[in-house]
Amino acid sequence: MFKKRFFSIGALLLSLMILLGACATWPQKPLNSVDSGQTKQAADLSIYPKGDLFITPQELKKRLGDQTAILVDTSKPDVYEKGHIPGAIGIGWHGLSQIVGKPGDPLWGTTLDKEALTKKLESYGVTNSTLVVFTSNVLPGPGSDGRNVWQLRMAGLDNVKLLYGGNPYWKELGYEMTKEASPKPALVTGLILKEFDKSYSADKNYVYTNLGKTVSIDARTEKEYKGSQDAGEARGGHIKGTKNLVWSSVLNENGTPKRPEEIIKRMADLGVTPQDDFVVY
């Protein structure tokens, strides 16, 4: 059973799902090694217990133009317009969330309900057999591609992946970016989502009931953790007893995740092992 719970999600969510999902012994080979010459060796995803949540840039490159695959870019609209992977659909960072009202209003920022989410995905051309890949500019954030993978996994879609390293690593490998608008996706029908798997999330009652019992991690910046409301927070500060681990601290400068043992060490410093239940927001 999936034990980790998430209150509000970004890139840290997927990193922890992938890196702390199980115990493993990791081979000591460079994670992003590159062959000499023009051939670029793909990252070894087998070092991650849940590495199947990723797709490498090399594999995605082979699937561009494939009618059975859809690439979704969750960067902010202005960032998307400055350059994206050819064919990527831009949906912004709240594309699959409820944003009626303002931050702090009931349900603001939460996942669309099952019916609305189904219709939204069908408008992007998603079927139950479609490979859906999410990407973004990754840094400086807000990690919305990871959030979207979590949302769709929660809704029962297993053919959903996160581009390893996102757009930054794609560009580092020398792959094409474009400013041209992608073709409008063809509307489909018949997508079937499951009832949301609540083991993927925690509500405020769960968090309150488990204060002092379960480690809670605030993945925002230290400034926000200490009370800043610059990002539009309805209230400043953090949940009592929560520990701070900035989401970007589990990533390398090129947007790829750090090695598993590095994440394990960071989590251990917070009092969390791979076997523990914890909440991240």
Image (cartoon, rainbow, N blue to C red):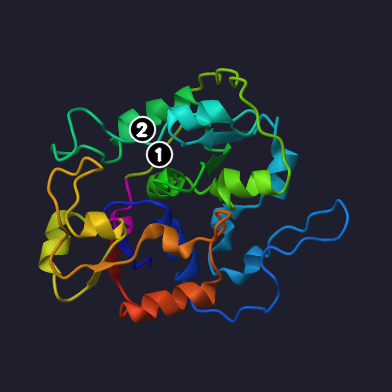
Q: Is residue 184 above or below residue 51?
A: above
- Residue 193 numbered mark, or none: 1
Which residue is rendered at x = 43% and y = 35% of the image?
192
Range of the magenta residues? 196-201
Is 252 part of what is drawn in magenta? Answer: no
At mark 1, the secondary structure is loop
Dot 1, how many residues are within 10 Å of its Cα: few (below 14), some (14-19), or many (20+)?
Answer: some
Amino acid type, mark 2:
Leu
The N terminus lies in which quarter of the figure?
bottom left
Is 198 part of what is drawn in magenta? Answer: yes
The reply to whether dot 2 and dot 1 touch (C-beta < 8 Å) is yes
Which residue is rendered at x = 33% and y = 57% of the image?
200
Q: Is residue 248 left or right of residue 221?
A: right
Q: Is residue 108 left or right of residue 129?
A: left
Q: Is residue 237 above or below residue 263?
A: above
Amino acid type, mark 1:
Leu
Q: Is residue 118 visible?
A: yes
Q: Circle 2 is placed at which residue position? A: 117
Say which quarter of the image contains residue 89: top right
Q: Is residue 1 above or below residue 66?
A: below
Looking at marks 2 and 1 on the same chain, the residue that comes earlier in the sequence is marked by 2
